[in-house]
Image: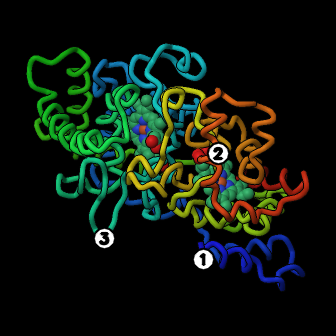
């Protein structure tokens, strides 16, 4: 918390006020060391072979899913900044895209899907809303242990295969997850055993006889020169990570990125004013810091439990569900904000329909409930616990006019 408070009062030196808008933003860019990230920034180099093309084949293949009905791109769509546009993702058993998918009877995954842009940045410190994959002191921490020991080349490579292992677990959680000691240890074991079983499965995926979809996958991989005898989960993860890196390399720079490269007119006046709010009285950069707009730390804005999927039955504990520490309950990783205007709805469970809704909720949660009421009686009584976790720093946000608020939203749209 000390770290926060020191940030509060020294965000803009008072001498900055005589300067032009651009000068003031320059000062911010220098102070925070901001650089363009997604298209030109610190992207881990794509492997020299054609691993990115092989990664795309895996990314698009439904043959990796148990029922042959889900691929990575089912939820990370090209036309939606590699996200899905849904409040929470819909996995196995679903069909179609968008609203159609939401009501197609598929399994509801408990969280809102992320865009994958910028994920191969060397500044990207941990993955998922609860940060369950990342790197610490040269070791990858993840539900499957230290991925380097298995041949994964980065935390992203591990994060990329977690969906393959977790799919059934999403189902399991609906009925069986509990805070009790025994289930916790079983849960801990569960992933690593799952990993071994899954790796074994993928090592033997291309054994004869193959199903038509698997043999099609084998042919596409062979066409790209892959030796299908060597394919295992680390190979798949490393290829997917290469593909994710390459999707960042080929992207269109945003207004903010062009501005950082010196194109003064890439931001509107209102977006420039919004940048000052973001780094000034909005206190946004206390958490959404750095070039990726995240401190990769865990906080609460008091987001209510969602109205879809697993939330209807139990609470999403966020980081607390990974560490099992009481103080970590309801904390979520500060989401990076690059391309945020393309990934509605917002929040870890997609509760907020618009940028306006989620930003206002940071400042004052009351209008949200006035407009939406309570999802159910249980929420009415349990939400106090969630609200009590709201980060203190949110109380220091001092935005007090519609124009400041609208400029801030405009700035977010330039990212
Ligand atoms: C059923 C929908 C669905 C499918 C299929 C899916 N994802 Fe995701 N993805 C999500 C959701 C939801 C999240 C956020 C989950 C969380 O944080 O707990 C996510 C998060 C991620 C992240 C972490 C991003 C970050 O910023 O932390 C990566 C990487 C990722 N997915 C890659 C993949 C890859 C690679 C595949 C294919 C093997 C895949 N996903 C398949 C829905 C999906
Ligand atoms: C105390 C740290 C903190 C501060 C300060 C903060 N945020 Fe956030 N922000 C978060 C967290 C944590 C979430 C995710 C909350 C959740 O899903 O439950 C979030 C979510 C968001 C989202 C939704 C992103 C998405 O992909 O769903 C936006 C947009 C956002 N914040 C913008 C802002 C703006 C603008 C400000 C300044 C007015 C701000 N934040 C200040 C921590 C913070």
Image location (x, y in percent) of residue 317: 48, 45
Q: What element does badge 2 sit on?
A: helix
Task: Give the residue drawn at x 60%, y 36%.
Answer: 350
Sequence-wise, the earlier of marks 3 and 1 is: 1
Which label was assigned to residue 137?
Answer: 3
Q: Which residue is mark 1?
A: 2
Cβ at disc 2 under 8 Å from ligand 2: no
- Colour scheme employed for the rendering of this structure: rainbow
> Residue under circle 2?
384
Picture layout, residue 9 above or below residue 371: below
- Answer left or right for 95 relative to 221: right
Q: Mark 3 and mark 2 in contact? Answer it, CB < 8 Å.
A: no
Whichever of labels 1 and 2 marks the residue nearer the N terminus, that label is 1
Quick one: label 1, few (<14), some, or many (20+) residues within 10 Å? few
Residue at left 74%, top 46%? 365
Quadrant of image for the N terminus: bottom right
């Amino acid at each position: 918390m000390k770290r926060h408070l020191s940030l509060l009062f020294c965000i803009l030196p008072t001498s900055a006020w005589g300067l032009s808008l651009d000068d003031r933003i320059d000062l911010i860019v220098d102070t925070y060391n901001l650089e363009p990230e997604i298209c030109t920034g610190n992207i881990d180099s794509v492997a020299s072979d054609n691993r990115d093309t092989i990664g795309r084949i895996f990314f698009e293949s439904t043959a990796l899913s148990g029922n042959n009905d889900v691929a990575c791109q089912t939820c990370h769509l090209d036309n939606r900044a590699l996200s899905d546009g849904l409040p929470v993702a819909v996995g196995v058993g679903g069909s179609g895209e968008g609203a159609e998918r939401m009501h197609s009877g598929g399994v509801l995954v408990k969280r809102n899907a992320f865009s994958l842009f910028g994920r191969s940045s060397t500044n990207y410190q941990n993955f998922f809303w609860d940060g369950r994959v990342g790197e610490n002191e040269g070791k990858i921490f993840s539900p499957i242990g230290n991925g380097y020991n298995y041949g994964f080349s980065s935390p992203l490579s591990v994060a990329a295969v977690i969906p393959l292992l977790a799919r059934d677990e999403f189902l399991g959680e609906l009925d069986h997850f509990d805070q009790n000691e025994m289930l916790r240890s079983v849960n801990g074991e569960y992933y690593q055993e799952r990993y071994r079983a899954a790796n074994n499965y993928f090592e033997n995926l291309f054994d004869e006889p193959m199903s038509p979809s698997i043999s099609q996958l084998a042919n596409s991989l062979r066409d790209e020169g892959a030796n299908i005898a060597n394919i295992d989960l680390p190979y798949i993860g490393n290829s997917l990570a290469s593909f994710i890196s390459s999707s960042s390399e080929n992207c269109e720079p945003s207004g903010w990125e062009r501005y950082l490269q010196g194109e003064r007119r890439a931001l509107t006046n209102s977006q420039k004013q919004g940048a000052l709010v973001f780094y000034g009285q909005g206190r946004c950069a206390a958490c959404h810091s750095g070039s990726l707009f995240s401190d990769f730390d865990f906080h609460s804005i008091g987001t209510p439990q969602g109205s879809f999927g697993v939330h209807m039955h139990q609470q999403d504990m966020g980081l607390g569900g990974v560490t099992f520490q009481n103080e970590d309950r309801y904390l979520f990783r500060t989401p990076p904000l690059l391309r945020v205007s393309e990934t509605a709805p917002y929040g870890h469970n997609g509760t907020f329909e618009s940028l306006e809704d989620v930003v206002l909720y940071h400042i004052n949660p009351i209008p949200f409930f006035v407009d939406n009421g309570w999802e159910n009686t249980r929420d009415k009584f349990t939400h106090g616990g969630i609200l009590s976790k709201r980060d203190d720093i949110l109380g220091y946000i001092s935005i007090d006019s519609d124009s400041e608020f609208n400029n801030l939203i405009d700035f977010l749209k330039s990212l």
